[in-house]
Image: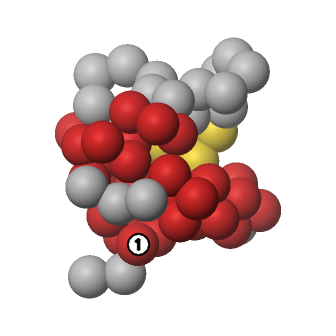
Amino acid sequence: MEIKEKVLDVLKGADKPLKAGEIAEVAAIDKKEVDKAIKVLKTEGIIDSPKRCFYSVKEA
C-alpha cells in the first residue's frame, strides 16, 4: 500500500481532524513521509485542513 493511501485510510477512519504526527503514529510511518503525502493530497483536493495543522478527508 502506498503511503498516500495509508494516510487516507487513517483520516477516513478518524472521527476528528488529525495532526500529521497523529497520522504517522497510527499508520506507523515516518512523519516526513506523512507530510509529503499530505501535501500531495491537499494539492489533489482530496483532503482539507479545517484548522491549522489538522487534516481531514473532504466531504463529498
* Neighbourhood count class around disc 1 (C-alpha, 10 Å): few under 14, some 14–19, many 20 upward: some
Farthest-out residue, bottom:
1
Name above or below for residue 19 compared with residue 37.
Answer: above
Residue 34 visible in rendering: yes
Q: Is residue 50 left or right of residue 6?
A: right
Residue 5, percent from left and from top:
37, 70
Kindly indicate the quadrant of the structure image that contains residue 51. Answer: top right
Q: Is residue 60 left or right of residue 25?
A: right
Kindly indicate the quadrant of the structure image that contains residue 58. Answer: top right
Residue that appears at 77% across and 62% down: 43
Residue 58 visible in rendering: no
Which image quarter is the N terminus in? bottom left
Name above or below for residue 60 compared with residue 53.
Answer: below
Residue that appears at 71% across and 59% down: 39
- Give the color scheme: rainbow, by chain, secondary structure or one colour: secondary structure
Q: Name the residue carrying label 1.
A: 3
Which amino acid lies under the numbered mark 1 shown in the image of this protein? Ile
Residue 23, percent from left and from top:
38, 42
Residue 20, percent from left and from top:
52, 39
